[in-house]
Image (tube, grey):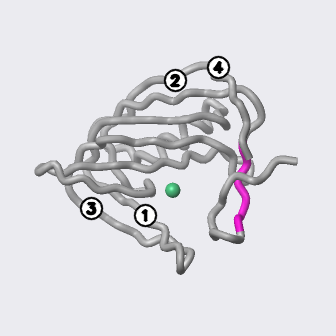
C-alpha cells in the first residue's frame, strides 16, 4: 500500500528529563489526536531498552543498555493500532567511545534530554493489523 500524503503541520518540542521516551511520544500523539505522521528526534538517554525482531522465531529479543548514551538518530512514524495512535520508532545510540548500536525502540528507554520533530499528515490513518507472513502488526492493505 502506498498513498501520497499532504503535510499539515509540524510539532516540535522537547521531552522532560526522566520520561520514558516511547511512552512520552505515544502520549503526545494520543493527547493531540495525531494518527498519521513521521517523527524524528535527537538527544541523549540515561539508559535504553531496544528490541531486535528474530525473523525465524517471529518474536522480539530484548536488549537493555544500562548506561548513558547519545541519541544519534530516532526515526519513525505514527499510525493507528487497535484505534490508538502508535509510534513505531527505530533508534541509533552511541556510547562514550562513539560506538553505535540500535534497534526497535521499546518502553524503558529513559530520557536525559530529547528534542523531537513530529510532522503531521492529512487524511485517514494507516491502520495496523496482524501480518501472517512476518508475524508483525503491519499496515493493512486498503480497500
Ligand atoms: Zn520496529
Q: Of discs 1 and 2, which sits in the foreground?
A: 1
Quadrant of residue 79 within the rendered picture: top right
Locate residue 90, reporting x and y percent. 44, 50
Location of residue 103 with respect to 85 vertically, above or below: below
Locate residue 107, reporting x and y percent. 44, 56
Q: Which residue is mark 2?
A: 11
Q: Which residue is mark 3?
A: 65
Location of residue 30 with respect to 101 vertically, above or below: above
In space, the residues marked 1 and 4 are separated at their CA atoms by 32 Å
Q: Mark 4 CB in 8 Å range of ligand 1?
A: no
Locate residue 71, reporting x and y percent. 30, 43
In space, the residues marked 4 and 3 are separated at their CA atoms by 37 Å
How busy is the neighbourhood of tag 2: few (under 14 within 10 Å), some, or many (20 plus)? few
Q: Which residue is mark 4?
A: 8
Label 1: which secondary element: strand
Specify whether 60 is left or right of 126: left
Q: Which residue is mark 1?
A: 51
- Say which of 121 and 2 sits in front: 2
Q: Which residues are magenta?
A: 126-131
Q: Mark 1 CB in 8 Å range of ligand 1?
A: yes
Name the residue located 50 percent from the left edge and 35 percent from the top edge.
39
Q: Of discs 1 and 3, which sits in the foreground?
A: 1
- Say which of 106 and 38 sits in front: 38
Amino acid at each position: 500500500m502506498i498513498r501520497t500524503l499532504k503535510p499539515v503541520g509540524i510539532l516540535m518540542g522537547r521531552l522532560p528529563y526522566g520520561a520514558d521516551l516511547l511512552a512520552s511520544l505515544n502520549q503526545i500523539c494520543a493527547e493531540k489526536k495525531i494518527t498519521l505522521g513521521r517523527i524524528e528526534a535527537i538527544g541523549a538517554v540515561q539508559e535504553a531498552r531496544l528490541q531486535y525482531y528474530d525473523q525465524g522465531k517471529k518474536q522480539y529479543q530484548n536488549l537493555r543498555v544500562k548506561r548513558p548514551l547519545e541519541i544519534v538518530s530516532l526515526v519513525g512514524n505514527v499510525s493507528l493500532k487497535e484505534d490508538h495512535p502508535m509510534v513505531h520508532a527505530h533508534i541509533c545510540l552511541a556510547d562514550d567511545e562513539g560506538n553505535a548500536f540500535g534497534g526497535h525502540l521499546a518502553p524503558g528507554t529513559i530520557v536525559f534530554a530529547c528534542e523531537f520533530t513530529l510532522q503531521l499528515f492529512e487524511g485517514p490513518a494507516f491502520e495496523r493489523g496482524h501480518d501472517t507472513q512476518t508475524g508483525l502488526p503491519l499496515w493493512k492493505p486498503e480497500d
